[in-house]
């Protein structure tokens, strides 16, 4: 999967848009509008924000296997496709923020990103995505916060319209086990709203982006990724089993594109994934 190198956090270290991408944000907290100056974004950069508590393992759910299987160098999850005669209009998913642990034998930084998005697979020239990421800056201490304790790590909320660079939503509270909901609605191949919702806290922000890199809107992605930081592949942190729930895309004709018939990607010996039903898929660390 060559495209993956270009996608995602791969362009994270660029500080400027490579296209004419523009965006505006708004948000609500418990139903009340959040003042704009309290919604904070920064260019995505490895090593920011605070440390959260230990992981919570979600309850086991049963699995079955019928989707075709493929492998990737750096991500696992479900990818489904639709012809450009019936494009993806929106994509949706819930998941619980997974706890992460360090992986023995992998170099630092280590990270695992959970996201949903549109394109980047059969359409490699653009990818619109949003999700969460856990990061271990180094083996035994948190360089940037100055907190020194083995095993400390951080979680971040982010969005990216690849090949433009990624943004961290620093004002979004995150805690392991809380429910996250992502909804990306496109209004054209170059305009979309991304809604990031902390369901547990009833805090939502909506980013309206225009003049983005041109999408084909034919790949629907629900993925856990071993991200690139610049041109280097991060070590792959172990993450708690992550269920993508209510995972569906809605197409122009109004029909849903779900999990069944998607390709289930795995990273050999690091990460596996499987479908459960048409709206649920799961990825887990090996
Ligand atoms: C996305 O579109 C759906 C269906 O039109 C709508 O119900 C939902 O509110 C929209 N969400 C956002 C974040 O715009
Ligand atoms: C959501 O809010 C809860 C309640 O404060 C908080 O514990 C956590 O940081 C947030 N979780 C998510 C999913 O963002
Ligand atoms: C991946 O998961 C599927 C479904 O549970 C299973 O059949 C397969 O053996 C797993 N592969 C690995 C390498 O764990």
Image: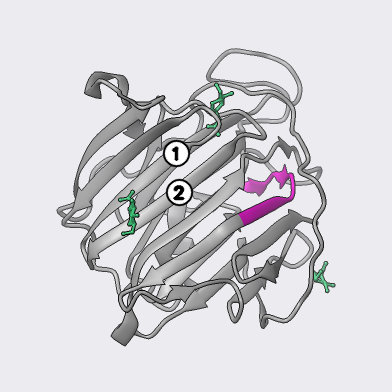
User: Is mark 2 in CB contact (under 8 Å) with mark 1?
Assistant: yes
Q: Nearer the viewer, residue 209 or 177?
A: 177
Crowd rating for badge 1 (residues with CA inside 10 Å; few <14, some 14–19, many 20+): many
Secondary structure, magenta segment, majority class: strand
Mark 1, residue position? 197
Give, as a single range, the part of the protein colored magenta.
234-244
Rounded to the nearest whole Å, what is the CA distance between mark 2 and mark 1? 6 Å
Mark 2, residue position? 182
Q: Nearer the viewer, residue 199 or 196?
A: 199
Image x and y of residue 153, in percent: 65, 28
Decide if residue 126 is on the left or right side of residue 122: left
- Residue drawn at x 63%, y 13% is 147
Q: Is 123 located above or below residue 73 in the figure?
A: below
Q: Classify mark 2: helix, strand or loop.
A: strand
- Residue drawn at x 75%, y 38% is 102
Q: Name the image quarter holding residue 179.
A: top right
């Amino acid at each position: 999967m060559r495209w993956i190198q270009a996608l995602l956090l791969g362009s994270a270290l660029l500080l400027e848009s490579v296209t004419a991408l523009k965006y505006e944000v708004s948000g609500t907290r418990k139903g009340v509008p959040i003042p704009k100056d309290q919604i904070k974004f920064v260019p995505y950069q490895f090593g920011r924000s605070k440390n959260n508590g230990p992981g919570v393992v979600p309850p086991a759910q049963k699995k079955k296997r019928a989707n075709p299987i493929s492998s990737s160098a750096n991500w696992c999850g479900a990818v489904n496709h639709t012809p450009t005669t019936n494009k993806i209009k929106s994509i949706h998913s819930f998941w619980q923020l997974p706890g992460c642990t360090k992986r023995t034998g992998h170099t630092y930084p280590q990270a695992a990103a959970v996201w949903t998005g549109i394109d980047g697979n059969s359409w490699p020239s653009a990818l619109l995505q949003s999700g969460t990421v856990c990061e271990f800056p180094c083996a035994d201490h948190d360089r940037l916060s100055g907190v020194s304790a083995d095993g400390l790590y951080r979680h971040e909320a982010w969005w990216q319209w690849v090949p433009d660079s990624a943004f961290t939503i620093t004002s979004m509270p995150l805690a392991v086990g809380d429910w996250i909901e992502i909804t990306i609605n496109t209004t054209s191949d170059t305009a979309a709203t991304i809604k990031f919702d902390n369901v547990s806290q009833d805090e939502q922000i909506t980013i309206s982006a225009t003049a983005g890199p041109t999408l084909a809107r034919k790949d629907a992605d629900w993925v856990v990724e071993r991200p690139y930081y610049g041109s280097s592949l991060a070590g792959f942190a172990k993450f708690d089993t992550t269920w993508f729930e209510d995972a569906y895309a809605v197409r122009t004709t109004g029909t849903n594109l779900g999990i069944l018939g998607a390709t289930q990607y795995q990273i050999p010996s690091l990460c596996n994934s499987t479908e459960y039903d048409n709206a649920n898929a799961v990825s887990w660390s090996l």
